[in-house]
Image (cartoon, rainbow, N blue to C red):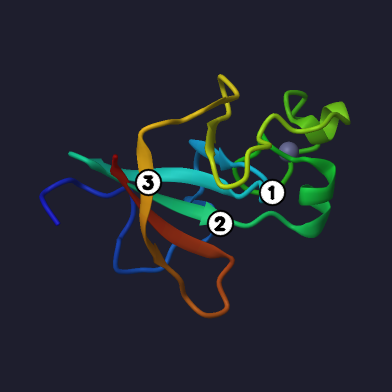
Amino acid sequence: MGESVPLFNMNEWPTNLAMTSLSAVKGGSLEKMCLIKEEGDERVYIVRAPTLLELQGNCDQCARQHQKTNTRCSMWLKRPTYATAEGELYDPSTKKIIYGWRLAEVETRRHSRIVKETYVRE
Ligand SMILES: [Zn+2]
């Protein structure tokens, strides 16, 4: 898979702690996505499903769980989320859809909330 240096041991399945930043939010499901590898026409994210409470509250700006101090988050603002188009990836800083990438591969592990998703350039 090339020569890039991953941010953590790619042989170990990532935990919540690997969600060091929020790179994208998936529309509708409000899954949180952290970019862990970008190489050529490929991007690999670790993806964490929100809790039911986070989904109902529209948490859309927090990398791991909802942060009660995150005043930018729609859950804090008690507002509808910006990430409304089902399955589209949103940039949490601009709140705009990230175009040009399509989902190519999903890796899961039993008993883990975290999945890995690989996107390729369209
Ligand atoms: Zn939040």
* Circle nearer the viewer, 1 or 3: 3
In the rendered structure, which amino acid carries the disc numbered 2?
Answer: Asn
Q: Is residue 76 left or right of residue 97?
A: right
Point out residue 15 in the picture as x, y percentages from the top left corner: 51, 62
Image position, residue 64 (x, y; %)? 62, 48
Q: Is mark 1 within 8 Å of ligand 1?
A: yes
Residue contact at pointers 1 and 3, CB within 8 angstroms: no
Instruction: Decide which of 81, 19 is in the foreground and name it.
Output: 81
**Which residue is situated farthest in the left direction here?**
2
Check residue 102 in the rendering and tell me which mark sits there, or answer none. Answer: 3
* Mark 1 residue element: loop
Q: Quadrant of the N terminus?
A: bottom left
- Residue 16 is tagged as 2
Residue bearing the label numbered 1: 65
* Amino acid type at image mark 3: Arg
User: Residue furthest toward the right?
Assistant: 78
Label 3 SS = strand
Q: Residue at x 36, y 40 (%)?
A: 101
**C-alpha span from label 3 to label 2:** 24 Å
State the residue in front, 69 or 87: 87
- Residue 96 occupies which quadrant of the picture? top right
Gap in angstroms between the C-alphas marked 1 and 3: 26 Å
Indicate which quadrant contains ligand 1.
top right
